Image (cartoon, helix red, strand yellow):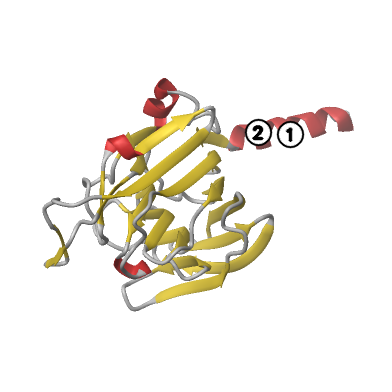
């Protein structure tokens, strides 16, 4: 039996629609219940990492689709420890981590996208990134700003084997569309395409990333790799229209 062309097109469209699954919808920052369905507060491992800010739930706000992370200057906090080194905590700030883990399946992958308003002031370190659930790497920095006036796109295969691309980040007081497409190449490696404001910036390869679960994190770290001292006034990092689509079978 030969189906009419219109019927064939409808079947193809339906199959394509079924192949795409929304992991995190654009509504996840609309309300507390929407947030709780997809996100946790802080890093997946706790409140501290590799900079001078300690994450705190009070520094995370959201409403009507807009996420705001605020870093404020503080004193009297106990030091953090990272890599065996003590780090002085000079800020309380915000971080969130997705409840889902993300691992690329055979023939599949993900799209991560959103609109970001991120500072490039010295001592500020906003990021939108993926990192390994078990050990390290993999790590994909889908967008990272380290106080230099630039935005960085990075893929870590090991601490010494990595790809990176730094480009000028104009108009940091405006929202910019960031998108990262991750796809299976050969059931071992993945391709990583980074876009800003609708244009492809760079394509990198994650070696042996296939099938490895990753955390999704949005955070406003301070000082550390972005230099010091950081600002004395509050620093804001805002995100809207955040969406994650899965193409895994």
Vertical relation: 124 (above or below) 166: above
Vertical relation: 24 (above or below) 196: above
Residue at image location 21% in from the left, 45% down from the top: 46
* Element marked by disc 2: helix
Q: Which residue is mark 2?
A: 17
Viewer-side residue, 56 vs 104: 56
Q: Residue furthest bottom?
A: 160
Viewer-side residue, 66 vs 82: 66
Mark 2, residues whose alpha carbon is within 10 Å: few (<14), some, or many (≥20)?
few
Q: Which mark is residue 13?
A: 1
Instruction: Give the side of residue 195 with respect to residue 48, left or right.
Output: right
Instruction: Give the side of residue 49 with respect to residue 39, left or right.
Output: left
Residue 190 location (% of width, % of height): 49, 61
Mark 1, residues whose alpha carbon is within 10 Å: few (<14), some, or many (≥20)?
few
Residue at image location 37% in from the left, 52% down from the top: 233
Viewer-side residue, 247 vs 85: 85
Q: Which mark is residue 218?
A: none
Cβ–Cβ under 8 Å for marks 1 and 2: yes
Q: Quadrant of the N terminus?
A: top right
Q: Can residue 133 be seen in this snapshot?
A: yes
* Element marked by disc 1: helix
Instruction: Indicate the quadrant where residue 38 lies.
Output: top left
Residue at image location 43% in from the left, 60% down from the top: 140
Q: Residue furthest top?
A: 33
Q: Can residue 249 be seen in this snapshot?
A: no
Q: CA distance from mark 1 to mark 2?
A: 6 Å
Residue 167 location (% of width, % of height): 57, 71
Residue 66 location (% of width, % of height): 51, 35
Viewer-side residue, 68 vs 207: 68
Instruction: Indicate the quadrant where residue 44 lies.
Output: top left
């Amino acid at each position: 039996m030969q189906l009419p062309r219109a019927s064939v097109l409808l079947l193809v469209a339906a199959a394509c629609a079924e192949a795409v699954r929304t992991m995190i919808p654009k509504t996840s920052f609309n309300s507390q219940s929407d947030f709780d369905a997809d996100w946790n507060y802080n890093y997946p491992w706790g409140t501290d990492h590799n900079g001078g800010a300690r994450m705190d739930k009070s520094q995370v706000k959201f409403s009507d689709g807009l996420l705001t992370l605020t870093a404020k200057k503080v004193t009297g906090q106990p030091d953090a420890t990272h890599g065996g080194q003590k780090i002085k905590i000079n800020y309380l700030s915000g971080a969130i981590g997705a409840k889902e883990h993300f691992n690329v399946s055979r023939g599949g992958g993900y799209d991560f996208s959103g609109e970001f308003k991120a500072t490039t002031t010295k001592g500020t370190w906003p990021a939108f990134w993926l990192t390994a659930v078990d050990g390290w790497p993999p790590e994909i920095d889908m967008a990272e700003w380290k106080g230099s006036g630039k935005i960085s796109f990075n893929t870590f295969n090991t601490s010494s084997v990595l790809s990176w691309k730094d480009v000028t980040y104009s108009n940091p007081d405006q929202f910019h569309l960031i998108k990262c497409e991750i796809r299976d190449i050969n059931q071992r490696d993945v391709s990583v395409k980074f876009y800003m404001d609708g244009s492809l910036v760079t394509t990198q390869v994650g070696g042996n990333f296939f099938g490895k679960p990753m955390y999704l994190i949005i955070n406003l770290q301070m000082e550390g790799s972005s230099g010091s001292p950081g600002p004395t006034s509050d620093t804001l990092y805002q995100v809207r229209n955040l969406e994650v689509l899965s193409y895994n079978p």
